[in-house]
């Protein structure tokens, strides 16, 4: 019987485990997990912290007991210390302190990512929190209950930072959000969109500080103040959300790493060593927009890579279809979605990039109920005409539209293909000259 060992039971690890259990009964599966829980939906942390959920119970969709009942040998609270790749043995320490040596025929690394801890003086003080695990979310949730915590600084304006800033403000705290670049969500949207998000957040009480770096956290054992390149701020709690990096330490020196530090894998999720696969946030992905490898840490990518890696580990050749990095966010009811490359990112990647923008009401003007403006930007290559990405934003729910653009990027659809695309019309949903058509027709 083939022995498959999976290190990590995050989204990718669980997807791999379920794929093997459901399709390959002739394989023995051992899952090793360092935590005492699995399947935490980190995307719900801000909802929980912000008081929009009654508790965290519904943020778990599986358990070690469930996987064990399905046939997996599940080891929780077990820390992997080293891997003998030549001898095919995983060396770990059990929760009782016992030494474990787990042999394998196939190994799937699903070790995920870890928060970046910038080298800031004072970062070790009490009430400096990171946002990754279930316990991280719980610590922040409990800390915000204290009347002594009146002012909170969120460091970093990526997705997690923006969501946590909204959550903290909803808890009635003075909320600062600091970002070293000149915009919120700079990795996913161009400024035409981020300017609106910044306005929405400021209108709801979040104090956004852009182009401002943290130089020191001050306090006597506990956070009391923040020093930046532009001033000093009295704060009682700091939330670090400056990004993530791949958890690839177990393979350092043995497996090839990409420049980003993640395991370099092919479309079968194979690493540089036979019989070793890497899935989820610890591995690279293939970007259809860039037509090259990239590092895009999203739960959706993790699940798909887990499925692909598991099938290949069990002998079924299956290649990844690549990814577009499709994503979305909703803050104070303002919805933004994107896929592929922004205009700025396309230019930085060396494309002869162009953009076409359009803004109009979602529905005809005579439809006065729940009818808001929609912004759309389509990014494309002027030479090949290939669609490279798209962004949409509105107080209406326009999220489903981004899936079409995701497929367009994946299938190398051109901007000209979209100009007379058959898109239906009904006043309840859209306009006869809808924003997708009008944006495409406006392209040079």
Image: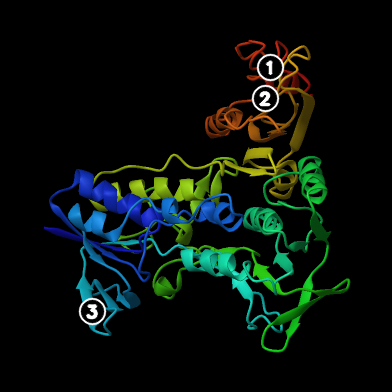
Q: Check contact, mark 2 vs mark 1: CB within 8 A.
A: yes
Q: Which of pointers 3 and 2 lies earlier in the amino acid sequence?
A: 3
Q: Secondary structure at mark 2?
A: loop
- Where does the C terminus fall, quadrant-wise? top right
* Quarter-of-image position of residue 381: top right
Residue that numbered label 2 is attached to: 415
For the residue pair 390 and 231, the one nearer the viewer reads as 231
Distance between the Cα atoms at labels 1 and 3?
A: 61 Å
Q: Secondary structure at mark 3?
A: strand
Residue 124 in picture, x, y percent from top left? 63, 83
Distance between the Cα atoms at labels 2 and 1?
A: 7 Å
Vertical relation: 354 (above or below) 107: above
Residue that numbered label 1 is attached to: 419
For the residue pair 86 and 261, the one nearer the viewer reads as 261
Whether residue 116 is visible, yes or no, is no
Q: Which of pointers 1 and 3 lies earlier in the amino acid sequence?
A: 3
- Disc 1 or disc 3, which is closer to the eye? 3
Which label sits on residue 100? 3
Residue 154 in picture, x, y percent from top left? 70, 64
Residue 163 in picture, x, y percent from top left? 65, 53
Characterize the local packing of mark 2: few (<14), some (14-19) or many (20 or more) Cα atoms within 10 angstroms: many
Q: Secondary structure at mark 1?
A: loop
């Amino acid at each position: 019987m083939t022995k498959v060992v999976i290190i990590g039971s995050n989204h990718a690890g669980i997807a791999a485990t379920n794929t093997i259990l459901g399709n390959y009964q002739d394989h023995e599966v051992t899952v090793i997990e360092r935590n005492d829980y699995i399947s935490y939906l980190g995307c719900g942390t801000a909802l929980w912290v912000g008081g929009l959920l009654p508790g965290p119970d519904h943020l778990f969709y599986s358990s070690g007991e469930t996987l064990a009942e399905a046939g997996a040998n599940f080891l929780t609270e077990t820390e992997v210390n080293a891997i003998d790749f030549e001898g095919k043995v995983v060396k770990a320490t059990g929760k009782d302190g016992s030494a474990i040596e787990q042999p394998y025929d196939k190994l799937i690394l699903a070790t995920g990512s870890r928060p970046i801890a910038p080298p800031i003086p004072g970062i070790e003080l009490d009430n400096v929190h990171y946002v990754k695990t279930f316990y991280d979310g719980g610590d922040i949730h409990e800390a915000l209950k204290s009347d002594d915590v009146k002012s909170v600084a969120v460091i970093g304006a990526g997705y997690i930072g923006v969501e946590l800033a909204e959550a903290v403000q909803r808890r009635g705290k003075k909320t600062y959000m600091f970002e070293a670049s000149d915009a919120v969500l700079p990795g996913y949207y161009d400024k035409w969109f981020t300017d609106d998000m910044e306005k929405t957040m400021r209108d709801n009480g979040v104090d956004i500080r852009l182009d401002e770096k943290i130089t020191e956290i001050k306090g006597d054992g506990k956070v009391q103040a923040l020093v930046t390149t532009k001033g000093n701020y009295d704060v009682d709690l700091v939330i670090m959300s400056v990004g993530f990096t791949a958890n690839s330490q177990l393979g350092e020196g043995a497996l090839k790493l990409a420049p980003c530090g993640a395991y370099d894998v092919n479309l079968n999720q194979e690493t540089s060593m036979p019989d070793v696969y890497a899935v989820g946030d610890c591995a690279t992905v293939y970007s259809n927009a860039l037509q090259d490898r990239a590092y895009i840490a999203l739960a959706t990518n993790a699940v798909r890579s887990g499925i692909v890696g598991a099938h290949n580990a069990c002998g079924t050749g299956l290649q990844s279809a690549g990814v577009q990095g499709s994503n979305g966010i909703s803050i104070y009811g303002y919805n933004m979605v994107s896929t592929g490359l922004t205009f700025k990112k396309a230019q930085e990647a060396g494309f002869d990039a162009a953009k076409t923008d359009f803004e109009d009401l979602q529905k005809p003007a005579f439809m006065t109920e729940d009818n808001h403006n929609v912004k759309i930007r389509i990014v494309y290559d002027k030479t090949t005409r290939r669609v490279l990405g798209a962004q949409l934003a509105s107080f209406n729910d326009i999220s489903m539209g981004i899936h079409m653009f995701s497929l367009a990027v994946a299938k190398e659809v051109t901007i000209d293909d979209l100009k007379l695309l058959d898109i239906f019309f009904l006043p309840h949903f859209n306009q006869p000259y809808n924003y997708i058509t009008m944006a495409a027709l406006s392209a040079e």
